[in-house]
Amino acid sequence: MSTNLARRSICAVALSVAAASCQAPDGVSIHEENDFFGLGNRSDDNYTQGLRVHAWYRPSNFSPGARELIHKASKWNPFFGGHDGRLTERSTNWLSMYGWTIGQSFYTPQDLTLDPPESTDRPYAGWLQSSVEGLWLEPVKDDVSQEFAQTGDKQEIARITFGLVGPAAGAEQVQSEWHRLINDTHPEGWSHQLGAEPTIMYSWAKKHTVLATDESSSGFAADMSATCGASLGTPFTVASGSVGLRVGYRPPRFGWIDVGPGDHAGGVIPQIRPRVSGSGASESDAPTRLRFYGTLDARATAVGWNTFLDGNLDGDGPSVDAKRLVGELQFGLVLARGRYSLAWVLQDRSPEFAEDSDSHRIGAILLSYTFEL
């Protein structure tokens, strides 16, 4: 198992670099997380802000040089095109996608007016990160003719994230300037933030559709899934398991999947619907098709290391006593029409450190555009 994961991570890096040689990505998304979107939570504390820009690519649109790299990588990983290493049309349009993400996240204590902050509250911290990833979709029995989720469908994702914690992440400047513009409380304690430290993290997750309803003539469908995942490195070393439910009108066969439980309310790949031959819908219908559905997920996470609570690796700087088991409940609403998709996600997370007695709520807005359906 460890060998396969290592191979997939290597392939994810190589193929995402190769994606840069494409003329344009197949889709992009902007993902904004903030406690402002958390329904009743307007405080800047705990994980308070995150912004990510994500792009993904299908191998069929790669340049000839990139496709040659995929051909070589397929010999390492059967998901790329079969055990014989060939690139088939089905594999390049359905079974694999690759992407990159850039983002910035920051964390603050509850009281922004204190300088220095309370030693029992979480420290100020900023994180600037960039990731490359591979996503593999495995329809049950290689059946790609169905539009809705089928019992036995699987998804798997591997991601490598490089980043920087500390003043160079720019969190102090962004939050201070934003609070000045909206005339909000100025954060006084950023001079006590975590020190400069590079980060590298490998994340992996696998999702299995355990139950799915039959297609209805009206287009309504529901499915239930189970996901396991882990992140190894810094800033997070964690492992988790979750169960999820989707209910709605024409939900795509493969929905979102957590990109490692170290991420927050929406560390997810947006729901992507690759073209499906024989699904009963013509390509001309795609630009006007409407979808809407809700999601509900419950997750438990075992925490081995969290830099934003445990502090810098050298032990020189602020830290708190992190809890090693955290629970999360996440609710989402998705509205999509043709190439556009808008999602709102609300997450409640149990206390993450010993001195924290309250759960934390954060919301996320995800806007996606698919260039070619």
Image (cartoon, rainbow, N blue to C red):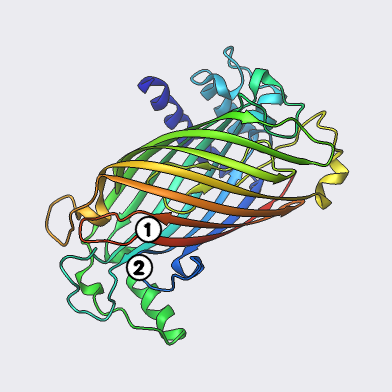
Residue at left offset 74%, top offset 51%:
339
Where 175 sits versus 95, above or below?
below
Identity of the residue furthest to the bottom in this view: 183
Disc 1 vs disc 2: Cβ atoms closer than 8 Å? yes
Residue to which mark 1 is pinned? 128
Question: Residue 160 in the image: x percent, y percent?
Answer: 40, 40
Q: Nearer the viewer, residue 346 or 252?
A: 346
Mark 1 vs 2, N-terminal side:
1
Q: Secondary structure at mark 2?
A: loop
> Three-letter amino acid code at disc 1?
Leu
Q: Nearer the viewer, residue 4 or 306?
A: 306
Q: CA distance from mark 1 to mark 2?
A: 8 Å
> Around disc 2, counting alpha carbons within 10 Å, would you say few (fewer than 14), some (14 to 19), or many (20 or more)?
some
Relative to 302, is 371 on the left or the right?
Answer: right
Q: Nearer the viewer, residue 186 or 177?
A: 186
Residue at left offset 42%, top offset 21%:
4
- Residue 170 got which mark? 2
Identity of the residue furthest to the front in this view: 357
Where 88 sits versus 137, above or below?
above
> Around disc 1, counting alpha carbons within 10 Å, would you say few (fewer than 14), some (14 to 19), or many (20 or more)?
many
